[in-house]
Image (cartoon, rainbow, N blue to C red):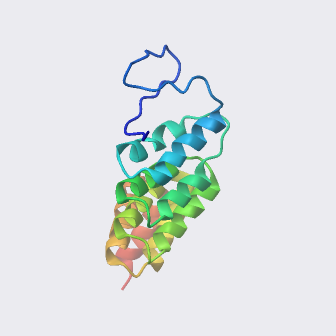
Amino acid sequence: GETTDLRFYVGGRWRSSSSATDLGTISARSAVDYLLGLAESNDGKAGREAIFPATLADSVTIWPQLLRIARSDSRPRNVRQNATFWLGQIAEEPATRGLSELVGDDAQDREVRESAIFALSQRRDEGVPALIRVLRTSKDPELRKKALFWLANSRDPRALDLIEELLTKR
């Protein structure tokens, strides 16, 4: 009665199996609710792996649920990091704002905060200003170091201006 693993298909043909329960054709909203419900409640492999297929759902906004999972101390670190990674792939400004808040939350696990910095690095236009804020305001030298690394790799003129400023500062 417990989900222990997932197999999902988008397009193509489903191959039935005696070891899997076919949920049949369901709406995108129902699929997302089921999958993210697993991510919020299942501490095993299924909980961790449920996030990616949820991101494939069409016409469903999932970033608020991903952010809730990323912030949840009750979820295993690997589930929170996975939610943080996929949050960074979502092209919505509120997701970027949520990632910035996650980095700035000193109560959060450092590895989850580092995952949020990486996720921000994937958000080119919106992520660079957020990483610059981390570099300028974070009290944690490791987080500043990670932010600087990703800024340097961005090749964004705003990041290059900041690096020049830091190098010429006396």
Q: Residue at x 47, y 53 (%)?
A: 41
x, y (%) of residue 126?
Answer: 57, 57
- The relative height of residue 2 versus residue 141 in the rendered view (above or below) is above
Q: Residue at x 48, y 57 (%)?
A: 120
- The relative height of residue 39 versus residue 165 in the rendered view (above or below) is above
x, y (%) of residue 161?
Answer: 46, 66
Total tally of numbered discs in the picture: 0
- Front-lying residue, 158 or 90: 90
- Front-lying residue, 2 or 48: 2
- The relative height of residue 159 versus residue 54 in the rendered view (above or below) is below
Q: Residue at x 47, y 16 (%)?
A: 14
Left or right: 4 with respect to 38?
A: left
Q: Is residue 122 visible?
A: no
- Front-lying residue, 145 or 76: 76
Q: Residue at x 37, y 72 (%)?
A: 144
x, y (%) of residue 152?
Answer: 37, 59
Q: Quadrant of the N terminus?
A: top left
In the displayed image of the protein, which residue is found farthest to the bottom?
A: 170
x, y (%) of residue 43?
Answer: 38, 52
- Front-lying residue, 37 or 109: 37
- The relative height of residue 53 versus residue 160 in the rendered view (above or below) is above
Q: Quadrant of the C terminus?
A: bottom left
Q: Is residue 25 visible?
A: yes
